[in-house]
Amino acid sequence: MAMTVRVDIVSIEKSIFSGLVEFVVAPAEMGEVGIYPGHAPLISRLKSGAVRMRVPDREDMEIIYVSGGMLEVQPGSVTILSDLALPEDEMSEDRLLAEGRKISETMKNRSTSMDFVKLEAELARAFNELRGYLHLSHRRTGV
């Protein structure tokens, strides 16, 4: 059995991934960083991009889009905290575009400045999700 390291990826809303992986590749601020079991301690800011993980006994890589955040590496664990984190299988261009249109339409009919602030934050989140989806889909197709 291959050596593994525990990975926890958490967004503001929920825990996105928690489990053992053989390695992790994360979009650190100064470039991608590869993390294997026993890696030296490290703390880094993350930029938007894909976190790729090799899960034991799975053929495909596990891919999770993050909108930035923080990465902490300890010899036996990796923790990623991100405002927005989405597994690749939850990303759908149609769903994200529809959500963006719905929020834009609601913004036109807002009644208070607080409504506007809430809707603006939701719109920013929806467009960040869409940007992540498009980034991942372009990497897969080589565009």
Image (cartoon, rainbow, N blue to C red):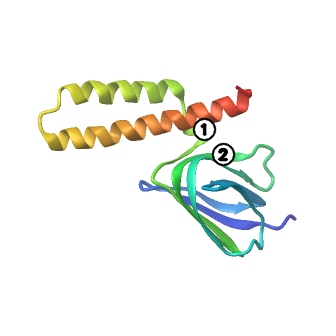
Counting residues from the N terminus, which is met first, the one under dot 1 or under dot 2? 2
Q: Is residue 136 above or below residue 141?
A: below
Q: What residue is shown at x 78% (from left), y 48% (from top)?
A: 58
Q: Is residue 49 above or below residue 78?
A: above
| Percent x, y of residue 131 | 52, 34
Give the amino acid type for the residue marked by disc 1 in the picture: Asp
User: Relative to the observer, which residue lies in front, 94 or 65?
Assistant: 65
Give the amino acid type for the residue marked by disc 2 in the picture: Ile
Q: What residue is shown at x 47% (from left), y 39% (from top)?
A: 128
Q: Please name the residue that numbered disc 2 is placed on.
A: 63
Q: Is residue 61 left or right of residue 103?
A: right
Identify the disc placed on residue 9. none
The reply to whether dot 1 and dot 2 touch (C-beta < 8 Å) is no
How many other residues sit within 10 Å of disc 2, few (<14), some (14-19) or many (≥20)? some
Q: What residue is shown at x 23% (from left), y 43% (from top)?
A: 117
Q: Please name the residue that numbered disc 1 is placed on.
A: 89
Residue reaching furthest right? 1
Quarter of the image where the C terminus is located: top right
| Percent x, y of residue 23 | 76, 59
| Percent x, y of residue 51 | 65, 50
Q: Is residue 93 left or right of residue 59?
A: left
Secondary structure beneath dot 2 equals: strand
Which numbered mark, 1 or 2, is in the foreground of this view?
A: 2
| Percent x, y of residue 68 | 52, 52
Q: Is residue 31 left or right of residue 118?
A: right
Residue reaching furthest left? 111
C-alpha distance separating marks 1 and 2: 9 Å
In the picture, residue 22 is in which quadrant? Answer: bottom right
Q: What residue is shown at x 71% (from left), y 32% (from top)?
A: 140
